[in-house]
Image: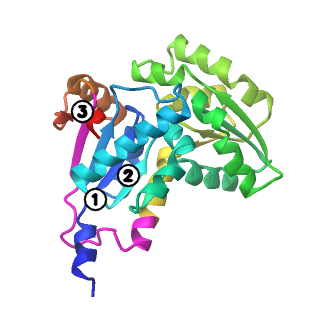
Amino acid sequence: MATIETAQNRNRPIGVFDSGLGGLTALKEIRAILPEEDLVYFGDTGRVPYGSRSRETICRYAEQDMRFLLSESACKAVVVACGTVSANALEQLKRHYTVPIIGVIEPAVEAAVRSSKNGKIGVIATPSSIASGAYTRALLAQDQSLSVTSAACSLFVPLVENGFIDPDDPIPTLTAERYLAPIRDAGVDTLILGCTHYPLLKPIIQRVLPHVALIDTGMEAAHRLSILLKEEALSCDGNSCGKGTTQFFVSDEPQDFAQAAARFLGLHPNAQFPIVRRVNIEAY
């Protein structure tokens, strides 16, 4: 029989954070896999993007984001739905906090290794993530014989956040063709979308690389979260646990976030978006 403490832990929400909107693609996958769980999302919209910041700054921001989630909601697990934070600050967060923390790199890397047939894997991510070498190290730790080709795609995040995601729009298409040329030339058969913004560009990326398997980091992190919750006896098991609610917090203008978030989550334009609350993240 579960202890009272275990039952209380199960009733706590899952925290998800990102530098802005991209983590909503991971949130969407978590909601699909774990519909009964309560979720708390924090988007650091006032300080986006993280991808061009120094490692020191990224680590400081990540610590504040974690402190907010744990002080606000006492989350039972946290998903770092940000490739940049996962690449630069995940190990630091795991040392500082006892709550289970899942990043987006390890699950995506394992999925890419399973997917690849020719041992040639590509990675696209923010400049900071690529510079950290985290994806390459993780891939080679799985298999030293792998050939890894990386490309920093600094314009992808602002394109997505400003709504330039239409497959017929020449702006994101030409940008993708420029960024993905070395990936194509290297003959990779599997590409890790190393930023949670990038799934919004998946149709464009797939058109440029029609025969390449695309690994969605948010989707893989959601699957890893489901496994972890079961292993740690933290998952809702059909009893009166979570209610499937989602709370949204941001560090900048809530209204701007709500309008863009509906697009990220695939909601109807006229759908009523939940209340979004603004947080003074510098206070944490």
Image quadrant in which you'd find residue 193: top right
Q: Label 1 sits on what residue type?
A: Glu
Q: Earlier in the sequence, mark 1 or mark 3?
A: 1
Residue 16 at least partly seen: yes
The tag on residue 30 is 2
Which of the marked residues, 1 or 2, is nearer the chain's N terminus?
2
Give percent across and percent down for residue 23: 40, 39
Distance between the alpha carbons at the discs numbered 1 and 3: 26 Å
Q: Amino acid at mark 2?
A: Ile
User: In terms of sequence position, does the residue under pointer 3 or pointer 2 come before the other?
Assistant: 2
Single out the mark in the foreground, 1 or 3.
3
Query: Which tag is nearer the camera, tag 3 or tag 2?
Result: 3
Q: Secondary structure at mark 1?
A: loop
Report the label total: 3
Q: Are marks 3 and 2 in contact (CB under 8 Å)?
A: no
Q: Is 273 on the left or on the right of 35, as rendered?
A: left
Q: Residues within 10 Å of mark 1 (few under 14, many from 20)?
A: many
Asked whether residue 78 is drawn in magenta, I would say no
Q: Position of residue 258 (x, y in %)?
A: 24, 29
User: Callout 2: helix, strand or loop?
Assistant: helix
Report how far apart the C-alphas of labels 3 and 2 lie in the structure. Answer: 26 Å
Type of secondary structure dominating the magenta stretch: loop
- Which residue is identified by label 3? 280
- Callouts 1 and 2 close, C-beta under 8 Å: yes
- In magenta, the rendered stretch is 228-251
Q: Residue at x 48, y 35 (%)?
A: 58
| Residue placed most toward the observer, 251 or 142 | 251
- Alpha-carbon neighbours of circle 3 within 10 Å: few (<14), some, or many (≥20)? few
Say if 118 sits above or below 188 in the image: below
> In which image quadrant can residue 205 be found?
top right
